[in-house]
Amino acid sequence: MDDEIRKNGLSFSFKKGRTIIYRATIRELGKPEYVRFLLNKKNKTVAVQCCEAIDKDRFKVPEFPKKNKGQFEISSLNFLTMLYKLEGWDQTKNYHLHGYVVPKYRLILF
């Protein structure tokens, strides 16, 4: 795994009700204006995909100020509930995933 793949990532905290997308993840997607999450129940995977303003369940990607930690937070307890149940995760723990880019579908798969 190269350095760029190790830098991208998502973090999940059920207790805090938040998902964090790291700047490297957004950078690898080409700095899109909007992203959405995709869940594959069969393969138990999650992806972050570039999308448009008209797409359902989208999130606007903020501008990253120079002093920003390089991440942005999304609050969606419904999403976290589905993800934690799908993965069989302990709701008292936080999880961090690293992914790889799938250019054909403009997404990063975790």
Image (cartoon, grey):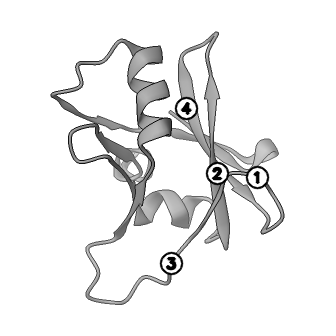
Q: CA distance from mark 2 to mark 4?
A: 10 Å
Dots 2, 4 in contact, CB < 8 A:
no
According to the picture, the residue beneath numbered tag 2 turns out to be: 36
The quarter of the picture where residue 53 lies is: bottom right
Q: Earlier in the sequence, mark 4 or mark 1?
A: 4
Viewer-nearest of labels 1 and 2? 1
Viewer-nearest of labels 4 and 1? 1
Q: Earlier in the sequence, mark 3 or mark 2?
A: 2
Q: Earlier in the sequence, mark 2 or mark 4?
A: 2
According to the picture, the residue beneath numbered tag 1 turns out to be: 56
Q: Amino acid at mark 4?
A: Val
Query: In terms of secondary structure, where does tag 2 sit?
Result: strand
Q: Nearer the viewer, residue 51 or 98?
A: 51
- Residue 105's tag is none
Q: CA distance from mark 1 to mark 3?
A: 18 Å
Q: Amino acid at mark 3?
A: Pro
According to the picture, the residue beneath numbered tag 4 turns out to be: 46
Dots 1, 2 in contact, CB < 8 A:
yes
The quarter of the picture where residue 58 lies is: bottom right
Q: Amino acid at mark 1?
A: Lys
Query: In terms of secondary structure, where does tag 4 sit?
Result: strand
Query: In terms of secondary structure, where does tag 1 sit?
Result: loop
According to the picture, the residue beneath numbered tag 3 turns out to be: 62
Q: CA distance from mark 3 to mark 2?
A: 14 Å
Q: Nearer the viewer, residue 46 or 103?
A: 46
